[in-house]
Amino acid sequence: MKAKVFGQHDEATLKQIETCLEAGGERAVLCADGHKGYAQPIGGVVAYKDKISLSGVGFDIACGNLAILTDAKRCDVDPRIKSIMDDVVRDISFGIGRKAKARVDHELFEDEAWKVAPIQGLKEMARDQLGTVGGGNHYVDIFADEQDRIWVGVHFGSRGLGHKTATHFLKAAGGKDGMDVPPTVVPVNSIIGSDYLTGMRLAGRYAYAGREAVARHVVREILGAEITEEVHNHHNFAWRENHDGEEFWVVRKGATPAFPGQRGFVGGSMGDEAVIIEGVDSGESREALYSTVHGAGRIMSRTAAKGKFERVGSKR
């Protein structure tokens, strides 16, 4: 079966999604902002019957977006936006390997999943990093919508916990390193598959807790506002789902779940426009396995873009 493809893509990206089908995928989708990734395209969705793709979920397990609508208005925020963003940088840790500036307590640290051998040694690191954002294209941003209502948006995942969990299981499963390799796929009912799912779900809870801690702090402690609504979703994860009467493990890598009535936050790069979306029920939605873009769309990966743009002053 060929993948359902939205938009225009280069041959390398198209080849990559086809390779995922050849490795055991039953159905596949390539979203409009897709581009080449590690073993599975960013913006790629692959459905497996009784398997799960470790490289499909990827190293940043449960990376996702959270947008919080506040009771603040643009006129309240505009005059002090510089000091607000200075306070964000003061209070929130950004960058690879950083510890939180204030420890965040959470009930997830009582989860039995921490007893799984590959994960138990990561607990203290995870405690230290909960409430940090990381690097790359991860961010904290403040938006005003068409009604001049203020939203706080964040984009990041499970930090070192997710990366080290993924690294361990990929190595244990004999996965190959690099982009042009077959995806590492394991049976879900195997020991490694079962342990991986436990670790992935824990990383998912951790990512949710981290995004909530950061975004809620910005709303309450920095803006001095109240929360009126939250829109929250992973876009690097695997879910057990029913499609057209069949059960699948659906692996989304840089793709937002968009079931009928389900809302999602799709943010671009920091400083760009962002949107709140809502899934609909249509033939095309069903073909897409109820999946859509995750934001920060680009025609090439950051690695491919390196060196192709020359900075002149403050502009490129």
Image (spheres, helix red, strand yellow):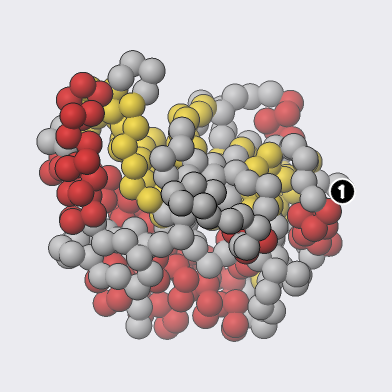
Q: Residue extending furthest right?
A: 1
Would you say residue 230 is visible in this rendering?
Answer: no
- Residue 194 location, quadrant: bottom right
Residue kind at label 1, given as amino acid type = Met
Q: Residue at horizontal 83%, vertical 53%?
A: 11
**Spot occupied by residue 294 in the image (x, y as percentages of width and height):** 55, 43
Tag 1 secondary structure: loop
- Residue 144 location, quadrant: top left
**Spot occupied by residue 138 in the image (x, y as percentages of width and height):** 42, 54
Position above or below: 293 against 282: below
Q: Residue at horizontal 74%, vertical 37%?
A: 6
Q: Residue at horizontal 31%, vertical 37%?
A: 142
Q: Residue at horizontal 20%, vertical 49%?
A: 86
Position above or below: 307 against 240: below
Residue denoted by label 1? 1
**Spot occupied by residue 285 in the image (x, y as percentages of width and height):** 68, 30
Q: Residue extending furthest top?
A: 147
Is 249 on the left-hand or right-hand side of 75? right
Position above or below: 311 against 125: above
**Spot occupied by residue 22 in the image (x, y as percentages of width and height):** 83, 62
Q: Crowding at label 1, few (<14), some or many (≥20) Cα neighbours within 10 Å? A: few
The residue closer to the viewer here, 177 or 1, is 177
Is 75 on the left-hand or right-hand side of 165? left
The residue closer to the viewer here, 20 or 111, is 20
Would you say residue 290 is visible in this rendering?
Answer: yes
The residue closer to the viewer here, 140 or 182, is 140
Is 55 on the left-hand or right-hand side of 18? left
